[in-house]
């Protein structure tokens, strides 16, 4: 049996000359408002796309490993992951190795739909 598709839907609405964006975590579930398009722009940056692609293709074992693969600072990657996790694009899986615990980033979605209503 095939896995159920995990989709994020983003609706951008023109309200009196300004755009507001609403993110639907999964089809048919609760909506989450963005604080304007600024957050959406941060969420859909080229760096976030590169990060998601690296998680999908290379499956890093930790945020630190992801930062090394990307050649980026750990804190910057961690901040990006927190934003993607907040909006449900990435899940953080806790894994124990000995006495240490690390968080492994995994993709939580396989597609995104953007709708613009004018």
Image: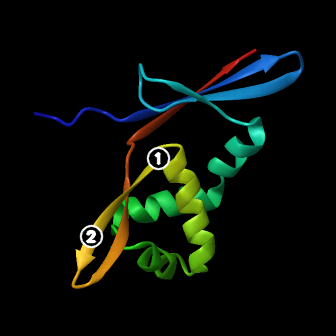
Residue designated by label 2:
95
Q: Residue 67 at what x, y percent from top left?
A: 51, 77
Q: In this view, does 4 lie above or below 92?
A: above
* Residue drawn at point x = 53 percent, y = 60 percent: 81
Q: Residue 50 at what x, y percent from top left?
A: 54, 62
Instruction: Return the residue found at the far front.
Output: 99
- Point out the tag, 1 or 2, that comes first from the N-terminus: 1
* Residue drawn at point x = 16 percent, y = 35 percent: 2
**Colour scheme of this structure image?**
rainbow
SS at circle 1? loop
Q: Residue 73 at what x, y percent from top left?
A: 61, 80
Query: In the shown orientation, is residue 51 left or right of residue 109?
Result: right
The C terminus sits in image quarter: top right
How many labels sit on residues?
A: 2
For label 1, count other residues whose C-alpha is less than 10 Å away and answer few (under 14), some (14-19) or many (20+): many
Quarter location, residue 76 = bottom right
Q: In this view, does 98 lie above or below 96?
A: below
Q: Residue 62 at what x, y percent from top left?
A: 38, 73
* Residue drawn at point x = 61 percent, y = 75 percent: 75
Query: In the shown orientation, is residue 85 left or right of residue 116?
Result: left
* Residue drawn at point x = 31 percent, y = 33 percent: 5
Point out the frontmost of discs 1 and 2.
2
**Separation of marks 1 and 2 at Cα, in angstroms:** 19 Å
Residue designated by label 1:
89
The N terminus sits in image quarter: top left
Quarter location, residue 39 = top right
């Amino acid at each position: 049996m095939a896995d159920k598709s995990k989709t994020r839907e983003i609706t951008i609405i023109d309200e009196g000359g300004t755009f507001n964006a609403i993110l639907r975590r999964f089809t048919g579930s609760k909506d989450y408002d963005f604080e304007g398009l600024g957050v959406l722009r941060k969420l859909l940056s080229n760096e976030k796309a590169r990060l998601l692609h690296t998680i999908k293709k290379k499956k890093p074992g930790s945020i630190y490993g992801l930062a090394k693969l990307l050649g980026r600072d750990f804190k910057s990657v961690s901040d990006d992951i927190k934003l993607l996790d907040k909006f449900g694009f990435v899940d953080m899986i806790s894994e124990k190795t000995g006495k240490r615990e690390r968080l492994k980033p995994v993709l939580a979605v396989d597609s995104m739909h953007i709708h613009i209503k004018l």
